[in-house]
Image: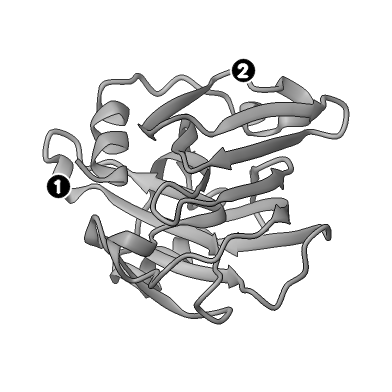
């Protein structure tokens, strides 16, 4: 089972209960976030509750920290967050299963209901091989999960970067679908395929009207 299939099946079984504030680590800590293991366990822990920093450390492991949260993209299409890489990895071909590792990724999920194979996901990644702005199919999920490089190997370690994405427009561009709702968000730092150690820090994730 691939990294995404397992997470989607788990999301299908969960109720939509999370409040908007639970994406803000500075307000709710890790309340509502759950971990899904794929290969070992990436360690996620709150560094500073007041600042909302969550550190992720992967030692040849892959697990995601996810939040089940229904978001109305018509009202709040913009996803905001900050992130920093502390220790880079050098994966193989990121278009292949053997290279599907990223020092940091944030992804949004639209569930397919009982038809789990219709579940869609966008992965905003800190790529080591692709240039900023490039997109490609995930090697495990194919066209159902699109990868989009927001940062690349040229962006330095130890520096915060702030991101802001119109998720509704990204779904339109990457999938040709105008979605009203998404059902969850997740963060993941993984190095199970490349066999290295990856470290990153994530700031608050939250949706805004503009």
Q: Disc 1 on helix, strand or loop?
A: helix
Where is residue 44? Give x, y as percent. 62, 30
Q: Which residue is mark 1?
A: 117
Pick the front one: 159 or 167:
159
- Characterize the local packing of mark 2: few (<14), some (14-19) or many (20 or more) Cα atoms within 10 angstroms: some
The image shows residue 80, relative to residue 176, as above or below, that is: above
- Whether residue 17 can be seen here: yes
Q: Quadrant of the C terminus?
A: bottom right
Is residue 107 or residue 79 the one in the foreground?
Answer: 107
Q: Residue at x 31, y 44 (%)?
A: 3
> Foreground: 146 or 128?
128
The answer to which of marks 2 and 1 sits earlier in the sequence is: 2
Looking at this view, name the residue that lies furthest to the left: 115
Residue 4, horizontal then vertical, whole percent: 30, 45
* CA gap, disc 2 and disc 1: 29 Å
Can residue 145 be seen?
no
Few, some or many C-alpha atoms within 10 Å of disc 1 (few <14, some 14-19, many ≥20)? some
At mark 2, the secondary structure is loop
Residue extending farthest front: 195
Residue 44 as seen in the image, left or right of residue 111: right
- Where is residue 169 drawn, in percent x and y? 47, 68
Q: Quadrant of residue 128?
A: bottom right
Q: Residue at x 69, y 50 (%)?
A: 81
Q: How is the image coloured?
A: one colour
Tag shown at residue 58: none
Q: Is residue 15 above or below residue 114?
A: above
Whether residue 180 is situated above or below residue 206 in the rendered picture: below
Task: Name the residue carrying label 2.
Answer: 31
User: What residue lies at 38% left-to-right and 50% top-to-bottom?
Assistant: 180
């Amino acid at each position: 089972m691939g990294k995404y299939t397992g997470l989607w099946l788990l999301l299908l079984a969960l109720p939509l209960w999370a409040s908007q504030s639970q994406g803000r680590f500075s307000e709710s800590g890790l309340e509502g976030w759950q971990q899904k293991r794929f290969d070992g366990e990436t360690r996620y822990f709150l560094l500073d509750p007041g600042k909302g920093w969550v550190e992720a450390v992967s030692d040849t492991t892959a697990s995601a920290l996810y939040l089940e949260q229904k978001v109305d993209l018509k009202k709040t299409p913009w996803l905001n967050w900050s992130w920093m890489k502390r220790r880079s990895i050098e994966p193989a071909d990121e278009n292949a299963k053997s290279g599907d590792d990223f020092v940091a990724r944030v992804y949004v999920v639209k569930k397919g209901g009982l038809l789990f194979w219709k579940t869609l996901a966008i992965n905003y990644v800190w790529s080591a091989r692709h240039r900023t702005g490039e997109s490609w199919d995930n090697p495990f999920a194919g066209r159902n999960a699109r990868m989009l490089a927001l940062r690349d190997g040229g962006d330095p370690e130890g520096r915060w970067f702030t991101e802001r994405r119109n998720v509704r427009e990204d779904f339109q561009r990457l999938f040709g679908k105008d979605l009203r709702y998404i059902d969850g968000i997740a963060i993941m730092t993984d190095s199970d395929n490349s066999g290295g150690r990856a470290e990153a820090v994530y700031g608050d994730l939250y949706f805004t009207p503009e």
